[in-house]
Image (cartoon, rainbow, N blue to C red):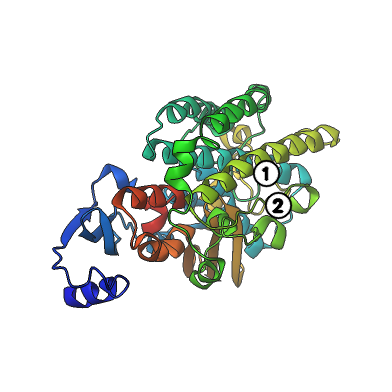
Amino acid sequence: MTQGIKANYWEKDLVRQEEPREYITLNVGPTHPATHGVFQNVMLMDGEFIVETEQTIGYIHRAFEKIAERRPFYQITPLTDRLNYCSSPLNNMGWHMTVEKLLGMEMPKRVDYLRIVVMELSRIADHLICNSVIGVDSGALTGFTYLFQEREFIYEIYEEICGSRLTTNMGRIGGFERNFSEKAWEKIRCFLKNYPVRLKEFERLLSRNRIFMDRTINVGPFPAEKALACGFTGPNLRACGVDYDVRVMNPYCSYEDFDFSIPVGQNGDTYDRFMVRQAEMWQSLHIIEQALAKLDVLSDKTTFHSGDYRYVLPPKEKVYNNMEALIWHFKIVMGESDIPVGEVYHSIEAANGELGFYLVSDGGRTPARLHFRRPCFIYYQAYPEMVAGNMLSDAVLTMSSMNIIAGELDA
């Protein structure tokens, strides 16, 4: 195998082919700060240059799909938290909408708009982590510590909405478990006021910084044709110049009511991936502002779930004081309510790309089959080709810009 690798590598450089070469095998991971998660890359190195690399995944595989097939529909939401844990509410909402599609439930506009507010906040939280980490891996720590204050503020908003911060278990099948408090709305408006200032400063720190540009431009490029062939979606595909976005191509949750742009890059390199995520954060802020405006003009100020009480939990005060409500609450949570036989696929535009749920129901209390389409698992296959011939330090930056989340990769 090594001889074959040497031959392929040095065919590109006939002048140096006659020189005897000594290769080093380097293990990057599974426990290594550069991997941003528990996975491994076995790299064949020629000095500082990568000849070939092979990924090893599965270190934190938790068999979520099989666990989900043993759980009632209502008890699967906490599993989705542990996919991309940087943007848990997006996973939660995607799963809820999949089940609602199977059940044929229609959501009130107010529920859709509330979900959009949460999902776009979640997208911002994910992108600011990814981009600030790219800065760290290029040698700029300041932006990371600066933007993480804003991530913490988003987590405070989550806490006001559902009581949790990182693994949120936010919302329920049919809507939310409670209405947003006035304090939550105050924090959301405060975030909309303050975050653009911080984001602009972060852009001034990096986007035209000569050192950062030299470290990221033409690093880990990937052409659009290969990205499409590999099944890329999300920012990594849009950085290649393909304007595919699930929110536009297959609208869900009333996204068709909103006006926003799809940022695209040109070269599909690390710099483009950084800039696409930066632009998407601005678009997310724009979407949240529109959602708040739409919520203000709605006459309904109290609805936070569907009116289909076959699948929506009764109010807690009734559960505590009414025997029928308690029984019905128990039936829904334990999977004793009627679930139709069917087969559905629903996808959303998660922070990393198209997050899909393929759900098969045989009418039982648990899914007969459930598959998570995780964008990280799809695009990680291209990593060896993206880093071959580059320096090790460039490979670390490429991995950061792909935003590979181990929890989503392994599931």
Res. 56 image quadrant: bottom left
Q: Amino acid at mark 1?
A: Ile
Q: Amino acid at mark 2?
A: Cys
First reached walking from the N terminus: tag 2 or tag 1: 1
> At 48% across and 33% down in the image, what residue appears?
165
> At 37% across and 35% down in the image, what residue appears?
139
Q: Position of residue 121 (x, y in %)?
A: 60, 38
Quick check: 337 above or below 297?
A: below
Distance in Å between CA atoms under marks 2 and 1? 7 Å
Q: Is residue 234 left or right of residue 28?
A: right
Q: Nearer the viewer, residue 286 or 315?
A: 286
Q: Secondary structure at mark 1?
A: helix
**Number of numbered labels in the structure image:** 2
Asked whether the viewer can see residue 132, the reply is no
Q: Are marks 2 and 1 in contact (CB under 8 Å)?
A: yes
Q: Position of residue 7 (x, y in %)?
A: 23, 76
Q: Position of residue 11 (x, y in %)?
A: 29, 75
Residue linked to disc 2: 253
Q: Residue furthest front?
A: 15
Crowding around mark 1 (Cα neighbors within 10 Å: few <14, some 14 to 19, many 20+) is many
> At 46% across and 39% down in the image, what residue appears?
212
Q: Is residue 75 left or right of residue 103?
A: left
- Quadrant, the N terminus: bottom left
Residue linked to disc 1: 116
Crowding around mark 2 (Cα neighbors within 10 Å: few <14, some 14 to 19, many 20+) is many
Q: Position of residue 79 (x, y in %)?
A: 43, 51
Q: Secondary structure at mark 2?
A: loop
- Quadrant, the C terminus: bottom left
Query: For residue 137, which numbered disc appears in the image?
Result: none
